[in-house]
């Protein structure tokens, strides 16, 4: 547990050390596992506070759905980043790519959990579905931008000046678009936000 806490602090304060470890293929399993735990724990907290708007069983549903949303977006989109990188001739192993992506999602989750006081105030005092939707969209957007910036720095650090043509930007852009599309689809299927739904996957009719 102490090691994972140390890893979390490194996410925030010593990102260059994390990037160097990934580039040198050191501690990759620990980085991936620690990132997954960070995403799971912090996004579950955010989901619980989000669920206060509707209350009851929705709190538990959102505690499950928000981590599921983020982790599935991460694992479904990571092969696309890797394959596109390989096709254009970039030298990065899949575990390295997954580590960089995992850390960026962990940072996004950390930013999300820092927004929970704001979410709490709106969840317990707001009655408008429209306003609460807008608030969450903005907060998720800000967290996504922070995670994307971290990913951008990670990719830049990995390749440095070796790729003069900056070819790594292509998988970064395409992968980002695909991640957005996957996230939107999962949001529609999960409907994790504000009311009780009978189905865990509303669009597929799958009961929790």
Image (tube, helix red, strand yellow):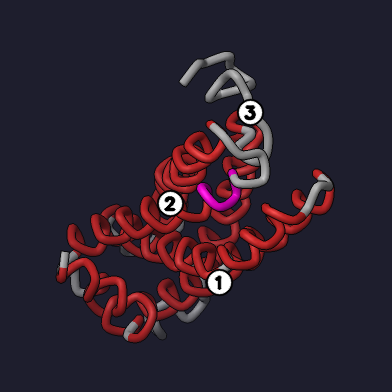
Horizontally, residue 165 falls left or right of residue 25, namely: right
Q: Are marks 2 and 3 in contact (CB under 8 Å)?
A: no
**Would you identify the image quadrant in which residue 155 lies?**
bottom left
Determine whether 137 is above or below 187 in the image: below
Task: Answer whether residue 135 is magenta in the image.
Answer: no
Q: Which mark is residue 87?
A: 2
Sooner in the amino-acid sequence: mark 1 or mark 3: 1
Q: Which residue has dot 3 on it? A: 196
Task: Tell me where residue 64 appears, x and y as whole percent.
Answer: 45, 38
The magenta-colored residue range is 47-51
* Residue 198 in sight here: yes
Q: What type of secondary structure mainly makes up the magenta span?
A: helix
Q: Tag 3: Cα neighbours inside 10 Å, few (<14), some, or many (≥20)?
A: some
Q: Secondary structure at mark 3?
A: loop
Residue drawn at (48%, 48%), measured in percent from left and top? 70
Task: Answer whether residue 50 is magenta in the image.
Answer: yes
Sooner in the amino-acid sequence: mark 2 or mark 3: 2
């Amino acid at each position: 547990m102490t090691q994972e806490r140390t890893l979390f602090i490194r996410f925030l304060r010593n990102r260059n050390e994390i990037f160097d470890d990934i580039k040198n293929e050191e501690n990759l399993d620990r980085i991936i596992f620690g990132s997954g735990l960070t995403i799971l724990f912090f996004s579950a907290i955010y989901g619980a506070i989000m669920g206060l708007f509707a209350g009851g069983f929705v709190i538990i549903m959102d505690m499950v759905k928000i981590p599921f949303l983020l982790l599935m977006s991460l694992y479904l989109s990571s092969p696309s980043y890797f394959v596109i990188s390989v096709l254009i001739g970039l030298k990065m192993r899949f575990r390295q790519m997954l580590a960089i992506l995992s850390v960026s999602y962990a940072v996004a989750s950390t930013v999300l959990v820092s927004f929970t006081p704001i979410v709490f105030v709106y969840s317990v005092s707001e009655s408008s579905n429209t306003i609460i939707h807008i608030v969450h969209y903005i907060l998720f957007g800000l967290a996504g931008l922070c995670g994307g910036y971290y990913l951008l720095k990670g990719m830049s650090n990995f390749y440095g000046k070796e790729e003069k043509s900056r070819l790594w930007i292509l998988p970064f852009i395409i992968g980002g678009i695909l991640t957005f599309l996957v996230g939107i689809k999962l949001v529609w299927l999960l409907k994790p936000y504000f009311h009780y739904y009978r189905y865990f996957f509303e669009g597929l009719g799958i009961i929790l």
